Amino acid sequence: MMAVKELARAWVERHRHALSEWHRTIWEFAEPAWREYRSAAWFVDRLRRAGFTVESASGGMPTAFAAQWSNGPGPTLAGYAEYDAVPGNCQAAATARGPRAGLSEFAPGHTDPHSALGIGALAGILATQHAMQQANLTGTLRFFGEPAEKVQGSKLVHGLRGYYDGIDAIISFHPFYMLPLCNTTRWDTHCGAYCSRVYSFICEEPQTWGAAASDSPIAAAHSAARAPGANVALFTMYSLTKATMESMLAHSGGWSLNEAILSAGQATADNLPAALAQINYAWRAPEIRMADAILEVLDRNAEHAAAIAHCRVVKRWVSRTRPGVANHCLAALTYRNLAAVGPPRYGAAAIALAHEIQQNLGLARLARPFLPACEELIEPEVAEARLREQMPAWQTHWTSDDYVEMSWYAPTVRLYIARPMLAAPPGYRGYPAWVSNALGGLPACIDPTIEVAGKTIAGTLLELLTHPQALAAARAEFAERTGGARFIAPLLPKEFAPPLDYRWPEYVTTARGADWWIPAAADLEAAGPSVS
């Protein structure tokens, strides 16, 4: 068995430079949710060149894909890539704050970074394929392109469309830094329920709000009465929701609610009432019942806000996921493979870059500039015990990620490999966000995460291929945890279609050329001039 795993590890070692270049390509693309056109095309091309059969735009999602490679009969094992970035986090791979060349700081950047997630997972799949070919191991590998994780958009769609059917086990990898889950696997407390919904307020008949002035030839004269319009509805809901948050789940911890106002409707300051305004609410909760309680208040607030402002409201789901399902068999097996590889290690080049960042921030250079936990393993049960110290005994799930939908279709393990994070000097309040974003683009700092992930994933997949009893145990545990009264059906209908056509942030091409949808303007940038 070790000889087969060594084949995979050697593949990762030989391809270290290529993996680093691949990662930097996706990191520089930095395309946001539902708009990852170049990133998805890159993965599709790379997988096809490796001999995979690839379906582009799987599940009706333009930036998704489903790839498969088979070496004969045997288990079907799966992994996936994510590659969406986050608007407002554009940062160069540098040791000082500044956006990537030619872009506004309001453009997207990889924060987690999903660029490392995708390439680390791809490394594991391709290393496994190589070992299977060399050792003549039979079985099937599936690899999915999962866009829009930041709005938890694609995995529930792939699941509803049947793409996860027939899979025997899934590895879900994510770069991580939140203590105590740096280099480990998730044990019991998996991610919880997530909901995301867009409320669109539409003012279709402003003329019926009130009469125009008696001498006005049109109902919308500059001095005539007119409907409040969609903007008023949106901000009425915004205010109502802020005022009612404490009553949504009174005295219940472990949940959150966030909002984002989508750019829609009028873009000029004419006197006409806004015809369209949209707000997206996303909320996390440990349990579905808690998520539903929040939904009830949001829907009620939307209806009242629409009525007050003389609008109608359209409600459309972006995502609605179930709490995750644990699998101790897979968690223990994967952690053993992680322990055999070891945690990420930062060499002299990475330390020098970290010191340069600290110096640029006016801080003293730490002898060990990286957070110690980034270079340490923590056993799953130990991490679980420390995690449980932070939450009440009744709470069964924590935070959210859409891998949870996969865990209802096949045994799924959640693997965490530390991403580079700097240790804070005594008394320092914390590093600005650009620091972690930059570390995710500096090869000397992020490459160790990718290499450890690739070797660990490959080792796990190969062990499942060669130890049928281990896979059988994982499947038996999955059946027990999801069977009978424990089963939770998907929360959205089979025909659910994601709102791809909504006004999500994206790169655009206009007569001015290619640009981010919020153009780079000097007076908007942090380093730009102050305008009074």
Image (cartoon, rainbow, N blue to C red):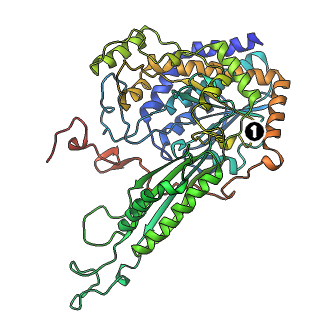
Asked which secondary structure carries label 1, the reply is: loop
Residue 306 drawn above or below residue 325: below
Please tell me in which quadrant of the rendered image residue 401 appears. top right
Residue sticking out furthest to the left: 532
User: Closer to the camera, 63 or 356?
Assistant: 356
Residue 283, image x, y percentages = 53, 50
Residue 234, image x, y percentages = 40, 63
In the displayed structure image, the side of residue 248 where residue 395 appears, left or right: right
In the displayed structure image, the side of residue 11 where residue 446 appears, left or right: left
Residue, x 86% and y 25% (percent of image)? 469
Q: Is residue 231 visible?
A: yes
Residue sticking out furthest to the bottom: 214
Residue 137, image x, y percentages = 79, 21
Residue sticking out furthest to the front: 251
Q: Which residue is labeled 1 in the image?
A: 410
Residue, x 25% and y 39% (percent of image)? 525
In the displayed structure image, the side of residue 328 where residue 207 appears, left or right: left
Considering the image in quadrants, where does the N terminus appear? top right
Residue 107, image x, y percentages = 36, 41
Residue, x 28% and y 20% (percent of image)? 360
User: Closer to the camera, 6 or 343?
Assistant: 343
Residue, x 67% and y 13% (percent of image)? 340
Query: How many tags in the picture?
Result: 1
Residue 356 drawn above or below residue 74: above
Q: Is residue 126 visible?
A: no
Neighbor class of circle 1 (other Cα within 10 Å; few <14, some 14-19, many 20+) is: many
User: Closer to the camera, 434 or 487?
Assistant: 487
Residue 226 drawn above or below residue 38: below
Identify the amino acid type marked 1. Ala
